[in-house]
Image (cartoon, rainbow, N blue to C red):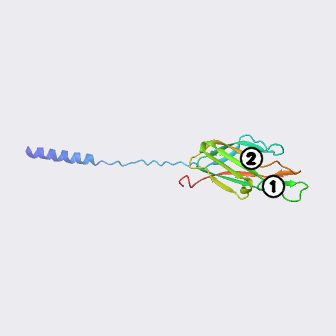
Amino acid sequence: MERCVKAVICFLIALLTSLTNVYANDSLTLSMSGVIEERCVVGIVDSIPFDFSIELSHTANLSIECNLPMLIALRSDYGGLELIDGSVETSLVAEYQVELNIDSLNFSLKQKSKELIDEQRFITGADIPFNTSGMIKVSLFEPLKFAGEYQDTLHIDVYPNFVNSGI
């Protein structure tokens, strides 16, 4: 009988040992991913032409959408309002100042138009603006004097700032 008890104990030990080493024959692997493309756009909320014939200063509200920290680039075609039609033979340029404010980013700048003939880029900080607004103000330093048509194009571009986004 003692032998029989030992055999049962050995059988139970072997059975318990085999139960603790049970492995699954099937497994499930779940792959997950997601991609969000970078997006940085700027627009004027109310598109109103800036006519400096009467007023020295004009303001516009901007809408900005960017899902990364951003850079703002400014460039002027002529470095001011250029007289393109008139009796004056020299190329006259009426300088102006650009003020740009984005309160949610604590960002503001003032730049003279003549400094914007070559594109200037400005870092707005490490914060991500997502959907925000800003304000741009363009002011002539003095009134236009000579007869004729004046024009300039101010280019405002926004770019993802990969340096501040950790990429």
Q: Is residue 107 left or right of residue 96?
A: left
Q: Residue at x 12, y 46 (%)?
A: 6
Q: 166 or 61, which is in the foreground?
A: 61
Q: Which residue is mark 1?
A: 93
The picture places residue 9, in percent across and down from the top left corner, at 15, 45
- Which mark, by number, is residue 123? none
- Of all residues, the one furthest to the right in this rendering is 87
Q: Is residue 107 left or right of residue 60?
A: left
- Which mark, by number, is residue 138? 2
Q: Residue at x 66, y 49 (%)?
A: 109
Q: Tell me if label 1 and label 2 are in contact, CB under 8 Å.
A: no
Q: Residues within 10 Å of mark 2 (few under 14, many from 20)?
A: many
Circle 1 — which element?
strand
Q: 122 or 89, which is in the foreground?
A: 89
- Of all residues, the one furthest to the front in this rendering is 142
Q: Residue at x 73, y 42 (%)?
A: 59
Circle 2 — which element?
strand
Q: Residue at x 68, y 51 (%)?
A: 157
- Residue type (three-letter) at the residue carrying disc 1: Val
Sequence-first tag of 1 and 2 = 1
- Residue type (three-letter) at the residue carrying disc 2: Val
- When asked about the image quadrant of residue 8, the answer is top left
Q: Residues within 10 Å of mark 1 (few under 14, many from 20)?
A: some
Q: 137 or 154, which is in the foreground?
A: 137
| Quadrant of image for the C terminus | bottom right
Q: 48 or 67, which is in the foreground?
A: 48
The picture places residue 112, in percent across and down from the top left corner, at 72, 53
Q: Is residue 32 left or right of residue 129?
A: left
Q: Is residue 73 left or right of residue 19?
A: right
